[in-house]
């Protein structure tokens, strides 16, 4: 994977860099409640400031659908960003036009301007060439530091990159390097863990992974569909019973391509999903009642996964192994996460995880900071795992 980074940029002093960031942060009552996405942008902003560039930040917030929606303004981000940067941040009430041009012209070398929500213009999501050209007029170079928006061919993520010298920012570079290490040019053997509720939402992902992995562990509710397809009693558990034939096709494809599928060999069942609910371990194949629900992987399955991780060099993880949000059905996810983290700390495993539930599960287990890389990119991470080209990344290829 070769793409242009800021290492390839020459002579940034005195230039204006248009930087696409992801400031779609959680807010309540007009206040930022979680600033991770602001912090992630700091290395790129500071590198450009240190190089003598003016920094102009482009971002979206929520889904205004091409209209000005005051409650979706980016202005509330300014105070938090100033605090994190330790420097003033000016705010323009539009992302194109005279005010934006005048404000950019007025800032000193190393100055920072945040432009208003690009999605206030219909041309953003339409990737309208005229709107992209209006954005391009504001700067000399383009930097994409928003991998989480790279799966969208929008004006500020793809169109603009075709009009100016374009580079990956520091956060984008780190994400792409980690993903390349996980599936592009990984150290083998490579194991994947895929969980979640439904097979139907991860068909493309499963079909892509069986051609790239040595082993694929399937957990969560989607594992129930595979067990059901093989004639194993799953009681009243969540499953897509109409996807049984598809599950068998995936198993056959994996076998043909030399990917070993690891399904649960035991599980934890309960009759209700609530904290502290009475539960019991069951070996796969034992009869269940219609009230029994599979809510977590069992101890033998955990032991099997621990052994598989120990024998691997690379892990890619998307989705929990059980209903981790409800204790005690977090046991398998936490145990496997702890082992993966220990191997990563020991330097014998490259572990990359991503997807909303995965990020939450790894934080719940207290090991998110111990993994090689944890992507918060959501949809972009999933599409990358599915093997789909991401327009915002393709535009940065060298």
Image (cartoon, rainbow, N blue to C red):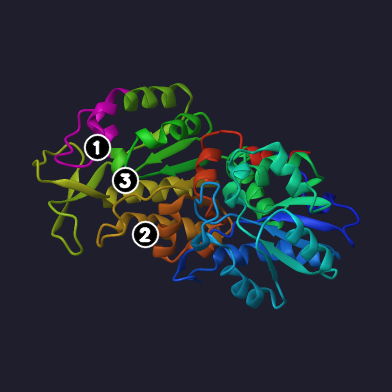
Of residues 190 and 234, the one drawn nearer to the viewer in this rendering: 234
Q: Secondary structure at mark 2?
A: helix
In percent of width and height, residue 309 lies at: 46, 48
Q: Which mark is residue 3?
A: none
Measuring from the top left, give residue 83's x and y in whole percent.
64, 78
Q: Which residue is mark 3?
A: 220
Instruction: Tell me the mark number nearer the camera, choosing from 2 and 3.
Output: 3
Crowd band around label 3 with a 10 angstrom C-alpha radius: few (<14), some (14–19), many (20+):
many
Q: Earlier in the sequence, mark 3 or mark 1?
A: 3
- Provide residue 90's location: percent of width, then percent of height: 71, 70
Outermost residue toward the front in this view: 98
Residue in the picture at 11% in, 38% down = 287
Q: Nearer the viewer, residue 291 or 103?
A: 103
Kindly report the distance in space between the C-alpha atoms of the residues bearing marks 2 and 1: 23 Å
The answer to whether residue 106 is left or right of residue 36 is: right
- Picture residue at 53% right of the left edge, 45% below the top: 381
Assign the N terminus to one quadrant of the image. top right
Mark toward the viewer: 3 or 1: 1
Residue at label 1? 239
How far apart in space, not on screen, are marks 2 and 3 (Cα)?
A: 13 Å
Magenta residues, start to end:
224-245
Q: x and y percent of residue 148 in the render?
A: 57, 50
Q: How many marks?
A: 3
Is disc 2 in contact with disc 1, using a CB cutoff of under 8 Å?
no
- Label 3 element class: helix
Q: Which residue is mark 2?
A: 334
Q: Earlier in the sequence, mark 2 or mark 3?
A: 3
Q: Quadrant of the C terminus?
A: top right
């Amino acid at each position: 994977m070769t793409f242009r980074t800021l290492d390839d940029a020459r002579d940034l002093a005195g230039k204006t860099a248009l930087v696409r960031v992801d400031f779609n942060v959680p807010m309540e009552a007009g206040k930022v409640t979680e600033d991770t996405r602001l912090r992630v942008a700091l290395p790129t902003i500071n590198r450009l400031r240190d190089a003598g560039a003016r920094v102009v930040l482009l971002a979206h917030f929520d889904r205004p659908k091409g209209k000005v929606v005051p409650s979706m303004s980016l202005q509330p981000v300014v105070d938090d960003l100033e605090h994190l940067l330790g420097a003033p941040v000016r705010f323009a009430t539009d992302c194109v036009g005279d005010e934006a041009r005048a404000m950019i012209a007025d800032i000193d070398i190393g100055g920072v301007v945040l432009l208003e929500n690009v999605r206030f213009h219909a041309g953003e999501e339409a990737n309208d060439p005229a709107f992209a050209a209006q954005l391009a007029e504001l700067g000399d170079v383009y930097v994409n530091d928003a991998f989480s928006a790279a799966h969208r061919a929008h004006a500020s993520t793809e169109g603009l990159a075709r009009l100016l010298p374009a580079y990956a920012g520091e956060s984008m570079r780190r994400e792409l390097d980690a993903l390349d290490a996980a599936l592009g040019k990984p150290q083998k053997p490579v194991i994947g863990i895929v969980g979640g509720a439904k097979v139907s939402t991860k068909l493309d992902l499963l079909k892509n992974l069986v051609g790239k992995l040595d082993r694929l562990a399937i957990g969560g509710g989607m594992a129930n569909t595979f067990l059901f397809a093989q004639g194993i009693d799953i009681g009243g558990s969540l499953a897509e019973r109409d996807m049984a034939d598809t599950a068998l096709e995936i198993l056959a494809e994996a076998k043909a391509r030399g990917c070993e599928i690891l399904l649960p060999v035991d599980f934890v069942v309960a009759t209700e999903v609530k904290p502290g609910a009475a539960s019991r371990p069951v070996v796969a194949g034992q009869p269940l009642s219609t009230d029994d629900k599979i809510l977590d992987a069992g101890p033998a399955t955990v032991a099997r996964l621990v052994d598989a991780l120990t024998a691997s060099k690379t892990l890619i993880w998307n989705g929990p192994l059980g209903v981790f949000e409800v204790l005690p059905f977090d046991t398998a996810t936490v145990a496997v996460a702890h082992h993966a983290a220990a191997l990563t700390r020991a330097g014998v495993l490259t572990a990359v995880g991503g997807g909303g539930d995965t990020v939450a599960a790894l934080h719940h287990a207290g090991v998110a900071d111990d993994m090689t890389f944890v992507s918060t990119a959501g949809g972009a991470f999933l599409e990358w795992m599915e093997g789909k080209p991401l327009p915002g990344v393709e535009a940065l290829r060298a």
